[in-house]
Image (tube, helix red, strand yellow):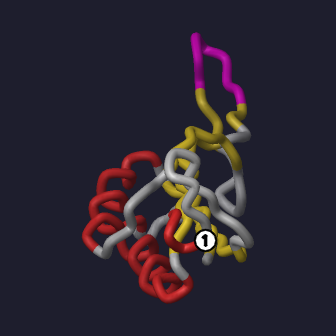
Amino acid sequence: MKWITAVIKPFKLDDVRTALMEIGVQGLTVTEVKGFGRQKGHTEVYRGAEYVVDFRPKLKLEAAIADDQEDKVIQTIQKAAHTGKIGDGKVFVFDLEKCLRIRTGETGQEAL
């Protein structure tokens, strides 16, 4: 099993969610986050004063998937979240050691 974490631009959420559902991803957790990478921050003007915004708003998507879905999920996220502009985001993949569905007690891949 794999744990996929993706950080994307907020306005791409619906595209990514729809694309993942189409390939059979059954669950997704979304968290509003802030951060920066190569995009850095930007300068804004508020009431005549200029200030630097260091962190950009992003969304963090997390999903537990079967091993055989890994490449397809990564490609799907990349395609759906892509704008071609700096700050499109990143995808991280971790090994998922255990999984338990609380309601039924199912474990492993059956719990996904």
Q: How far from the left and from the top, in percent, is residue 82?
A: 41, 69
Q: How far from the left and from the top, in percent, is residue 17?
A: 35, 57
Q: Main secondary structure of the magenta part?
A: strand
For the point 59% across and 17% down, the residue is 46
Q: Amino acid at mark 1?
A: Gly
Place residue 94 in its image quadrant. Answer: bottom right
Left or right? Give the position of 76 relative to 36.
Answer: left
One can see residue 98 in this view: yes
Q: How many marks?
A: 1
Question: Which residue is outermost to the top?
Answer: 47
The residue segment tinted magenta is 45-51
**Foreground residue among 98 and 103:** 103
Residue 98 belongs to the span the image colors magenta: no
Place residue 51 in its image quadrant. Answer: top right
**Foreground residue among 28 and 58:** 28
Q: Secondary structure at mark 1?
A: helix
* Residue at the disc numbered 1: 108
Local crowd at mark 1 within 10 Å, few (<14), some, or many (≥20)?
some
